[in-house]
Amino acid sequence: MEKIIKKIAVMTSGGDAPGMNAAIRSVIRAASYYKIESLGIYRGYQGLIEGDIVKMDARSVHHIIHKGGTILKTARSDDFRTKEGRKKAYDNLIEHEIDGLVIIGGDGSFTGGMIFNEEYNFPIIGIPGTIDNDIYGTDFTIGYDTALNTVVEVIDKIRDTASSHNRLFFIEVMGRDSGFIALNAGIGAGAEEILIPEEDLAIERLLVSLENSRRSGKTSSIVVVAEGDKTGENVFELAAYVEKHLPQYDVKVSILGHMQRGGSPSCFDRVMASRMGVKAVELLIDGKTNLMVGIRNNKMDTTELERAIKEHHNINSEILRISDIMSV
Ligand code: ATP
Protein backbone atom coordinates (compact mmCIF):
# COMPACT_ATOMS: atom_id res chain seq x y z
CA MET A 1 0.00 0.00 0.00
CA GLU A 2 1.21 3.52 -0.80
CA LYS A 3 2.35 5.58 2.12
CA ILE A 4 -0.01 8.46 2.93
CA ILE A 5 1.81 11.77 2.56
CA LYS A 6 1.32 13.85 5.68
CA LYS A 7 4.31 16.15 5.60
CA ILE A 8 6.50 17.40 2.75
CA ALA A 9 9.56 19.63 2.46
CA VAL A 10 10.77 21.94 -0.29
CA MET A 11 14.26 23.24 -1.10
CA THR A 12 16.06 25.24 -3.76
CA SER A 13 19.43 23.93 -4.93
CA GLY A 14 22.23 24.82 -7.37
CA GLY A 15 22.12 28.19 -9.12
CA ASP A 16 19.30 30.56 -8.21
CA ALA A 17 16.75 31.65 -10.79
CA PRO A 18 13.96 34.23 -10.76
CA GLY A 19 10.65 32.48 -10.15
CA MET A 20 11.99 30.04 -7.56
CA ASN A 21 10.05 31.93 -4.89
CA ALA A 22 6.85 31.55 -6.88
CA ALA A 23 7.53 27.79 -7.00
CA ILE A 24 8.20 27.61 -3.23
CA ARG A 25 4.98 29.54 -2.61
CA SER A 26 3.05 27.21 -4.85
CA VAL A 27 4.38 24.05 -3.17
CA ILE A 28 3.57 25.38 0.31
CA ARG A 29 0.11 26.64 -0.68
CA ALA A 30 -0.75 23.41 -2.51
CA ALA A 31 0.31 21.41 0.56
CA SER A 32 -1.92 23.61 2.71
CA TYR A 33 -4.80 23.15 0.23
CA TYR A 34 -4.46 19.36 0.52
CA LYS A 35 -4.11 19.57 4.33
CA ILE A 36 -0.49 18.44 4.30
CA GLU A 37 2.10 19.94 6.65
CA SER A 38 5.08 21.58 5.00
CA LEU A 39 8.64 22.50 5.83
CA GLY A 40 11.25 24.63 4.08
CA ILE A 41 14.88 23.50 3.89
CA TYR A 42 17.42 26.33 3.75
CA ARG A 43 20.54 26.23 1.53
CA GLY A 44 19.63 23.14 -0.49
CA TYR A 45 21.30 19.82 0.33
CA GLN A 46 23.79 21.48 2.69
CA GLY A 47 20.94 22.83 4.83
CA LEU A 48 19.30 19.41 4.79
CA ILE A 49 22.52 17.82 6.06
CA GLU A 50 22.89 20.48 8.75
CA GLY A 51 19.22 20.34 9.77
CA ASP A 52 18.49 23.91 8.66
CA ILE A 53 14.77 23.19 8.35
CA VAL A 54 11.77 25.36 9.29
CA LYS A 55 8.06 24.82 9.49
CA MET A 56 6.11 26.76 6.86
CA ASP A 57 2.47 27.38 6.08
CA ALA A 58 0.37 29.29 3.55
CA ARG A 59 1.08 32.57 5.34
CA SER A 60 4.87 32.16 5.45
CA VAL A 61 5.01 32.55 1.67
CA HIS A 62 3.00 35.76 1.33
CA HIS A 63 4.57 38.66 -0.62
CA ILE A 64 7.27 36.57 -2.25
CA ILE A 65 5.83 35.80 -5.69
CA HIS A 66 7.36 38.96 -7.18
CA LYS A 67 10.80 38.57 -5.61
CA GLY A 68 13.90 37.35 -7.44
CA GLY A 69 16.37 34.90 -5.88
CA THR A 70 15.09 32.38 -3.34
CA ILE A 71 13.90 33.04 0.20
CA LEU A 72 15.13 29.55 1.15
CA LYS A 73 18.63 30.43 -0.12
CA THR A 74 20.51 27.99 -2.28
CA ALA A 75 23.90 26.30 -2.11
CA ARG A 76 26.18 23.78 -3.71
CA SER A 77 26.97 20.96 -1.30
CA ASP A 78 30.09 18.82 -1.56
CA ASP A 79 28.98 16.92 1.56
CA PHE A 80 25.92 15.63 -0.28
CA ARG A 81 28.22 14.01 -2.83
CA THR A 82 29.43 11.66 -0.05
CA LYS A 83 27.57 8.67 1.43
CA GLU A 84 28.04 10.07 4.95
CA GLY A 85 26.52 13.40 3.91
CA ARG A 86 23.49 11.72 2.35
CA LYS A 87 23.04 9.56 5.47
CA LYS A 88 22.86 12.73 7.60
CA ALA A 89 20.36 14.19 5.13
CA TYR A 90 18.22 11.06 5.40
CA ASP A 91 18.39 11.07 9.23
CA ASN A 92 17.16 14.68 9.26
CA LEU A 93 14.25 13.89 6.95
CA ILE A 94 13.21 11.01 9.23
CA GLU A 95 13.68 13.10 12.37
CA HIS A 96 11.33 15.74 10.94
CA GLU A 97 8.88 13.02 9.81
CA ILE A 98 9.07 14.24 6.21
CA ASP A 99 7.35 11.93 3.71
CA GLY A 100 8.33 13.58 0.43
CA LEU A 101 10.76 16.15 -0.93
CA VAL A 102 10.38 18.75 -3.70
CA ILE A 103 13.71 19.88 -5.16
CA ILE A 104 13.73 23.08 -7.23
CA GLY A 105 16.99 23.21 -9.19
CA GLY A 106 18.96 22.12 -12.22
CA ASP A 107 20.29 18.79 -13.48
CA GLY A 108 23.01 18.57 -10.80
CA SER A 109 20.38 18.86 -8.10
CA PHE A 110 18.30 16.18 -9.83
CA THR A 111 21.34 13.87 -10.06
CA GLY A 112 21.85 14.22 -6.30
CA GLY A 113 18.15 13.58 -5.74
CA MET A 114 18.17 10.48 -7.90
CA ILE A 115 21.19 8.98 -6.13
CA PHE A 116 19.52 9.73 -2.81
CA ASN A 117 16.32 8.02 -3.95
CA GLU A 118 18.25 4.94 -5.06
CA GLU A 119 19.92 4.67 -1.67
CA TYR A 120 16.95 5.43 0.60
CA ASN A 121 13.89 4.97 -1.61
CA PHE A 122 12.78 8.42 -0.49
CA PRO A 123 10.04 10.13 -2.57
CA ILE A 124 11.52 12.96 -4.63
CA ILE A 125 9.96 15.28 -7.21
CA GLY A 126 12.04 17.81 -9.17
CA ILE A 127 10.99 21.22 -10.47
CA PRO A 128 13.31 22.66 -13.17
CA GLY A 129 14.64 26.02 -11.98
CA THR A 130 17.52 27.44 -13.99
CA ILE A 131 17.83 30.40 -16.34
CA ASP A 132 19.65 28.28 -18.96
CA ASN A 133 16.58 26.32 -20.15
CA ASP A 134 18.90 23.37 -20.72
CA ILE A 135 16.79 20.63 -19.15
CA TYR A 136 15.18 17.85 -21.16
CA GLY A 137 11.48 17.18 -20.51
CA THR A 138 10.19 20.71 -20.36
CA ASP A 139 9.80 23.41 -22.98
CA PHE A 140 10.79 26.02 -20.39
CA THR A 141 12.59 26.13 -17.06
CA ILE A 142 11.75 28.58 -14.29
CA GLY A 143 13.77 31.79 -14.67
CA TYR A 144 14.50 31.48 -18.36
CA ASP A 145 11.80 33.87 -19.57
CA THR A 146 12.83 36.49 -16.99
CA ALA A 147 16.48 36.16 -18.00
CA LEU A 148 15.53 36.62 -21.68
CA ASN A 149 13.64 39.81 -20.86
CA THR A 150 16.57 41.13 -18.82
CA VAL A 151 19.04 40.42 -21.62
CA VAL A 152 16.86 42.01 -24.29
CA GLU A 153 16.40 45.13 -22.17
CA VAL A 154 20.16 45.48 -21.68
CA ILE A 155 21.00 44.84 -25.35
CA ASP A 156 18.48 47.53 -26.34
CA LYS A 157 20.44 49.95 -24.17
CA ILE A 158 23.81 48.87 -25.51
CA ARG A 159 22.48 49.33 -29.04
CA ASP A 160 21.80 53.00 -28.28
CA THR A 161 25.47 53.61 -27.55
CA ALA A 162 26.64 51.24 -30.32
CA SER A 163 24.73 53.17 -32.99
CA SER A 164 25.78 56.57 -31.63
CA HIS A 165 29.47 55.65 -31.95
CA ASN A 166 29.39 53.28 -34.95
CA ARG A 167 30.58 50.47 -32.77
CA LEU A 168 30.58 46.71 -33.01
CA PHE A 169 29.62 45.15 -29.69
CA PHE A 170 30.27 41.58 -28.63
CA ILE A 171 27.85 40.84 -25.81
CA GLU A 172 28.45 37.70 -23.79
CA VAL A 173 25.40 36.13 -22.17
CA MET A 174 25.05 33.09 -19.87
CA GLY A 175 24.95 29.58 -21.31
CA ARG A 176 28.03 27.43 -20.80
CA ASP A 177 26.57 24.44 -22.60
CA SER A 178 23.47 25.82 -24.19
CA GLY A 179 22.57 28.66 -26.48
CA PHE A 180 18.91 29.18 -25.52
CA ILE A 181 19.45 32.58 -23.93
CA ALA A 182 21.82 33.81 -26.65
CA LEU A 183 19.66 32.66 -29.53
CA ASN A 184 16.28 33.83 -28.28
CA ALA A 185 17.45 37.07 -26.69
CA GLY A 186 19.59 37.69 -29.78
CA ILE A 187 16.58 37.39 -32.07
CA GLY A 188 14.46 39.45 -29.68
CA ALA A 189 17.03 42.23 -29.54
CA GLY A 190 17.73 42.18 -33.26
CA ALA A 191 21.37 41.05 -33.03
CA GLU A 192 23.29 40.85 -36.31
CA GLU A 193 25.01 37.58 -35.34
CA ILE A 194 24.42 35.02 -32.61
CA LEU A 195 27.12 32.57 -31.55
CA ILE A 196 26.04 29.49 -29.58
CA PRO A 197 27.76 26.27 -28.40
CA GLU A 198 25.43 24.07 -30.47
CA GLU A 199 26.41 25.62 -33.81
CA ASP A 200 29.90 26.20 -35.08
CA LEU A 201 29.93 29.41 -37.07
CA ALA A 202 33.48 29.52 -38.41
CA ILE A 203 35.24 32.75 -37.57
CA GLU A 204 35.87 33.44 -41.26
CA ARG A 205 32.15 33.31 -41.92
CA LEU A 206 31.61 35.75 -39.08
CA LEU A 207 34.16 38.14 -40.64
CA VAL A 208 32.52 37.87 -44.06
CA SER A 209 29.08 38.44 -42.60
CA LEU A 210 30.20 41.50 -40.61
CA GLU A 211 32.02 42.91 -43.61
CA ASN A 212 28.94 42.41 -45.78
CA SER A 213 26.82 44.15 -43.16
CA ARG A 214 29.21 47.10 -43.14
CA ARG A 215 29.20 47.32 -46.93
CA SER A 216 25.41 47.19 -47.00
CA GLY A 217 25.35 50.35 -44.90
CA LYS A 218 25.21 49.11 -41.30
CA THR A 219 27.27 51.38 -39.11
CA SER A 220 26.94 49.48 -35.86
CA SER A 221 26.43 45.86 -35.00
CA ILE A 222 25.57 43.62 -32.09
CA VAL A 223 26.96 40.10 -31.86
CA VAL A 224 25.49 38.01 -29.02
CA VAL A 225 27.85 35.30 -27.78
CA ALA A 226 26.87 32.47 -25.43
CA GLU A 227 29.45 31.83 -22.70
CA GLY A 228 30.13 28.34 -24.07
CA ASP A 229 30.57 29.33 -27.72
CA LYS A 230 33.71 27.81 -29.21
CA THR A 231 34.38 30.31 -32.03
CA GLY A 232 37.22 31.96 -30.08
CA GLU A 233 39.15 31.10 -26.90
CA ASN A 234 36.90 33.59 -25.17
CA VAL A 235 34.87 36.66 -26.10
CA PHE A 236 37.85 39.04 -25.69
CA GLU A 237 40.04 37.00 -28.06
CA LEU A 238 37.18 36.77 -30.50
CA ALA A 239 36.70 40.53 -30.40
CA ALA A 240 40.45 41.17 -30.79
CA TYR A 241 40.58 38.85 -33.81
CA VAL A 242 37.68 40.63 -35.48
CA GLU A 243 39.13 44.06 -34.72
CA LYS A 244 42.44 43.03 -36.28
CA HIS A 245 40.77 41.83 -39.47
CA LEU A 246 38.08 44.49 -39.71
CA PRO A 247 39.89 47.65 -38.58
CA GLN A 248 36.98 49.81 -39.81
CA TYR A 249 35.01 48.71 -36.77
CA ASP A 250 35.47 50.12 -33.26
CA VAL A 251 35.00 46.87 -31.31
CA LYS A 252 33.79 46.67 -27.70
CA VAL A 253 33.00 43.78 -25.39
CA SER A 254 30.30 43.65 -22.76
CA ILE A 255 29.83 40.67 -20.41
CA LEU A 256 26.39 40.71 -18.85
CA GLY A 257 27.21 38.27 -16.02
CA HIS A 258 25.12 37.75 -12.93
CA MET A 259 22.59 40.49 -13.63
CA GLN A 260 20.95 37.84 -15.84
CA ARG A 261 20.01 35.79 -12.79
CA GLY A 262 18.43 38.62 -10.83
CA GLY A 263 15.30 40.70 -10.85
CA SER A 264 11.60 40.25 -10.36
CA PRO A 265 10.29 37.21 -12.26
CA SER A 266 8.20 37.76 -15.39
CA CYS A 267 4.49 36.93 -15.28
CA PHE A 268 5.21 33.90 -17.46
CA ASP A 269 7.72 32.51 -14.94
CA ARG A 270 5.39 33.21 -12.00
CA VAL A 271 2.46 31.41 -13.60
CA MET A 272 4.56 28.47 -14.78
CA ALA A 273 6.21 28.12 -11.36
CA SER A 274 2.77 28.15 -9.73
CA ARG A 275 1.58 25.38 -12.03
CA MET A 276 4.72 23.30 -11.46
CA GLY A 277 4.53 23.62 -7.67
CA VAL A 278 0.95 22.34 -7.56
CA LYS A 279 1.78 19.47 -9.90
CA ALA A 280 4.79 18.45 -7.76
CA VAL A 281 2.66 18.21 -4.62
CA GLU A 282 -0.08 16.29 -6.43
CA LEU A 283 2.50 13.79 -7.72
CA LEU A 284 3.79 13.15 -4.20
CA ILE A 285 0.22 12.67 -2.96
CA ASP A 286 -0.33 10.16 -5.78
CA GLY A 287 2.67 8.16 -4.56
CA LYS A 288 4.92 9.16 -7.47
CA THR A 289 8.67 9.62 -7.15
CA ASN A 290 11.81 10.25 -9.20
CA LEU A 291 9.97 12.48 -11.64
CA MET A 292 10.56 15.99 -12.88
CA VAL A 293 7.59 18.24 -13.52
CA GLY A 294 7.67 19.93 -16.90
CA ILE A 295 5.53 21.87 -19.31
CA ARG A 296 5.14 20.79 -22.92
CA ASN A 297 2.86 22.45 -25.45
CA ASN A 298 1.34 24.35 -22.52
CA LYS A 299 0.33 21.15 -20.73
CA MET A 300 1.80 19.85 -17.49
CA ASP A 301 3.98 16.82 -18.07
CA THR A 302 6.39 14.56 -16.16
CA THR A 303 9.72 13.01 -17.11
CA GLU A 304 11.79 10.40 -15.26
CA LEU A 305 14.61 12.24 -13.48
CA GLU A 306 17.11 9.94 -15.17
CA ARG A 307 15.89 10.97 -18.62
CA ALA A 308 15.73 14.64 -17.66
CA ILE A 309 19.40 14.46 -16.67
CA LYS A 310 20.74 12.29 -19.48
CA GLU A 311 18.92 13.59 -22.51
CA HIS A 312 19.60 16.88 -24.19
CA HIS A 313 17.14 19.72 -24.62
CA ASN A 314 17.81 20.61 -28.23
CA ILE A 315 17.48 24.02 -29.78
CA ASN A 316 14.51 24.24 -32.10
CA SER A 317 15.82 24.24 -35.69
CA GLU A 318 13.07 26.63 -36.77
CA ILE A 319 14.44 29.29 -34.39
CA LEU A 320 17.90 28.78 -35.87
CA ARG A 321 16.46 29.33 -39.34
CA ILE A 322 14.76 32.55 -38.23
CA SER A 323 18.03 33.79 -36.82
CA ASP A 324 19.78 33.11 -40.14
CA ILE A 325 17.11 34.88 -42.15
CA MET A 326 17.08 37.90 -39.81
CA SER A 327 20.84 38.43 -40.17
CA VAL A 328 20.62 38.89 -43.96
P1 ATP B 1 22.57 24.96 -12.19
O1 ATP B 1 22.00 24.37 -13.47
O2 ATP B 1 22.06 26.31 -11.92
O3 ATP B 1 24.06 24.83 -12.07
P2 ATP B 1 22.33 22.56 -10.65
O4 ATP B 1 21.23 21.98 -9.85
O5 ATP B 1 22.73 21.81 -11.89
O6 ATP B 1 21.95 24.05 -10.99
P3 ATP B 1 24.83 21.82 -9.34
O7 ATP B 1 25.79 22.66 -8.59
O8 ATP B 1 25.32 21.05 -10.50
O9 ATP B 1 23.61 22.78 -9.71
O10 ATP B 1 24.19 20.76 -8.31
C1 ATP B 1 23.62 21.19 -7.07
C2 ATP B 1 23.98 20.25 -5.97
O11 ATP B 1 23.46 18.93 -6.26
C3 ATP B 1 25.47 20.01 -5.78
O12 ATP B 1 26.09 21.04 -5.04
C4 ATP B 1 25.48 18.70 -5.02
O13 ATP B 1 25.21 18.91 -3.65
C5 ATP B 1 24.29 17.96 -5.64
N1 ATP B 1 24.81 17.01 -6.64
C6 ATP B 1 25.12 17.26 -7.94
N2 ATP B 1 25.63 16.15 -8.53
C7 ATP B 1 25.65 15.19 -7.57
C8 ATP B 1 26.07 13.82 -7.52
N3 ATP B 1 26.59 13.21 -8.59
N4 ATP B 1 25.93 13.16 -6.35
C9 ATP B 1 25.41 13.74 -5.27
N5 ATP B 1 25.01 15.02 -5.23
C10 ATP B 1 25.12 15.74 -6.36
Image (cartoon, grey):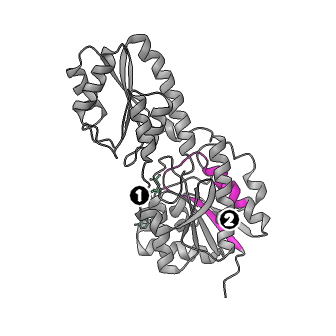
Q: Position of residue 253 (x, y in %)?
A: 35, 26
Q: Residue at x 37, y 23 (%)?
A: 169
Tell me the quadrant of ligand 1: bottom left
Quadrant (top left/top right/bottom left/bottom right) for the N terminus: bottom right
Q: CA distance from mark 1 to mark 2?
A: 32 Å
Quadrant (top left/top right/bottom left/bottom right) for the C terminus: top left
Q: Which mark is residue 39?
A: 2
Taking depth in this image into account, of 14 and 304 the one nearest to the observer is 304
Dot 2 crowding, Cα within 10 Å, few <14, some 14–19, many 20+: many
Q: Position of residue 106 (x, y in %)?
A: 49, 57
Q: Which mark is residue 312?
A: 1
* Three-letter code, disc 2: Leu
Vertical position of residue 165 compared to residue 269: above or below: above
Q: What range is drawn magenta here?
A: 7-28
Dot 1 crowding, Cα within 10 Å, few <14, some 14–19, many 20+: few
Q: Is residue 174 left or right of residue 41?
A: left
Taking depth in this image into account, of 94 and 18 the one nearest to the observer is 18
- Disc 2 is placed on an element classified as strand
Q: Within the magenta stretch, is there residue 143? A: no
The answer to which image quadrant residue 283 occupies is: bottom right
Q: Is residue 110 visible?
A: yes
- Asked whether the beta carbons under mark 1 and mark 2 sit within 8 Å of each other, the answer is no
- Disc 1 is placed on an element classified as loop
Q: Is residue 240 left or right of residue 219?
A: left
